[in-house]
Amino acid sequence: PIGCNHCGPRYLYTSKERRLEKFEDLLEQTAKDLLAGKLIAIKGLGGYNLVCLASCEESVQRLRTIKGREGKPFAVMFRDLSQLEEYAFITEKERELIRSWRKPILILKQKKALAPSVSNGLNTTGCLLPYLPFHYLLFKKVPHPLVYTSGNLSDEPIVTDNEIAFNVLLPVVDAVVSHNRDIYNRLDDSVACVIDNTARTIRRARGYAPASIAVNLPTEGIFAAGAELTNCFAIGKDTRVILSQHIGDLKNYETYQFYTESIEKYKTLFRFTPSLMACDLHPDYLSTRYATEASLPVEPIQHHHAHLAACMAEYKLNEPVIGVCFDGTGLGDDHCLWGGEFLVCTLTGYTRHYHLEYTPLPGGDRAIEEPWRTAVAYLFQAFEEETIIKNIFHSCHDIGKNIPVVIDMIKKKINSPLSSGAGRLFDAVAAITGTCLHASFHAEAPMRLESLINTSCEDEYPFSFQHNTIHTREMIREIAHDVLHHVPVPEIAAKFHNTLVSIIFAVVYKINQETGLRKTVLSGGVFQNRYLTERTATLLRQKGFEVFTPSEVPCNDGGIALGQMVIAAARRNKK
């Protein structure tokens, strides 16, 4: 935005004690507050941010309480690149990305610790550099790293309006620094990482949206509703796809309001009139309901096909490919929850060649929040008796007393949908090893398991095939044996990840022998795992496969809308 003495932005500092309008005074007071360990809400480019000293544990803990954010890591803004390099390891490719005009939050490996609860036990930190004049001026007075997180409470959208900031944020922080430039399009900070020496988007927002993506298909008039979690939607113009910014979890009422308001803004801004609605196969997703209630033709699209098609669209792959899609859950054609899928697909269709074996999720969605439930299901499937399960969780009384109840649910098929999700397998192993029994944020269990890997361990666990199903029961038995014999968790984590690499290669090789295909797409949220992705891609390339992973759009559900769009366009074009 333009910065001008006449047009603004004109800043205002407001606390319970004072109100400052002169810029030098309010900047000085903001710096004093931060250095004293206070929490400040600062209005930025796409909304408010909550800011505190990253070295002050008391301030960070208070911030967690305010946001209702028990475990999810916070992003940290550093004064400059030299300060960042004191706290994080950074490659040349990562240096190039974090200094780019997009200025994303970049996930980097920790070198030096900040306050313990900033990253909360993970070995990575979300790092970013200043991107507004106010940031640069503030760092002249506060030469320390700052926690810089979205200005919202719990899972609500980021606050953009000054009055809402005064009414909602000011009562829980020490001061609000606002300005007079209205924000018409709410934008979170984008999140990125470098995996396999390639820049990859994790959350696509400021600096990326609403940049369009060119595809080799006419997309005019198609609306893609996206998924329910980490939602982005998309609209089709000519032969391009315009993806929205990160919207969030649609199950939150305020987020769903943001979703519908943003759709109307995009319709106006891009003069878009929908004629075809593409959506997920799951009828209960709020995005699906939005699409089906529009009184327009609807194209339902399977979740994992959309994941893979998004990557195919990015690389303009129009021929059949081997698709490996690993994520948490997505409704399959058989009404089970898929997520460990090996498909052969084009943009118009797919065949399911192999998948991870089905395992019950006792409690349904509750099993995602409580990974120990998923662990009980995998252990019971592997051992078919309770004793070893109770031995695994012997030190957890609350879990131990509930094990018979969960097993009874599994036996009687009470609220225990079948899942082949690779993400749920990660949850189970994280819980069996005691790494994460209860998840306080999405994908916490897999993230914690990855952060523990002993990278010098090359061992792996056994697995087997039965027809088109990949069995992991023997692996679970071996993991349980290792836990009971006190094998270090970093070694177990490494062996588990190495096994998944071997599974992926073995199955891709089998499909190659059956079809002759060599182009292989890896997508789904599990492939945000750097260790798994880099090892898998390296092995496949060494064996002559051509590997494609998402870069411009997230491999998580934030990229689903692009896949929905190109599948709907390809099917419409074929008719």
Image: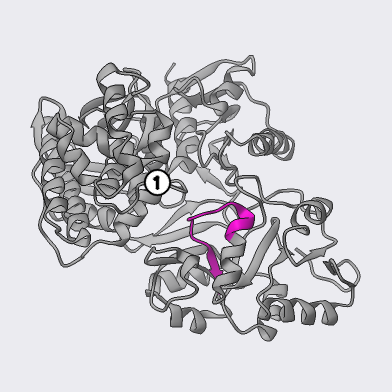
User: Residue at horizontal 68%, vertical 27%?
Assistant: 273
Determine whether, in the image, residue 172 is placed left or right of residue 315. right
Is-magenta flag for residue 454?
Answer: no
x then y, percent, for residue 504? 19, 43
Residue type (three-letter) at the residue carrying disc 1: His
Q: Is residue 409 above or below residue 535?
A: above
Kindly identify which residue carries mark 1: 438
Is residue 71 one of those drawn in magenta? yes
Crowding near the residue tagged with mark 1, few <14, some 14–19, many ≥20 C-alpha atoms within 10 Å = some
Percent coordinates x, y for residue 305 in the rendering: 36, 30
Q: Residue at left 52%, top 72%?
A: 99
**470 displayed left or right of 375:** left
Q: Please state which of residues 79 and 100 is positioned toward the viewer in this rendering.
A: 79
Q: Is residue 118 above or below residue 524?
A: below
Residue 275 vertical placement versus 238 (above, below): above
Colour mapping: one colour
Q: Position of residue 389 (x, y in %)?
A: 20, 39
Side of 565 where 188 appears, left or right? right
Determine if residue 237 is in view: no
Identity of the residue drawn at 84% across and 77% down: 23
Q: Secondary structure at mark 1?
A: loop
Q: Quadrant of residue 467?
A: top left
Query: Which image quarter: residue 403?
Result: top left
Left of 153 or right of it: where is 480? left
- Quarter-of-image position of residue 503: top left
Report whether residue 464 is seen.
yes
Name the image quarter holding the C terminus.
top left
27 vs 103, nearest the viewer: 27
Magenta-colored span: 64-77
The x and y percentages for residue 463 are: 10, 40
- If the image is split into quadrants, where does the N terminus sit? bottom right
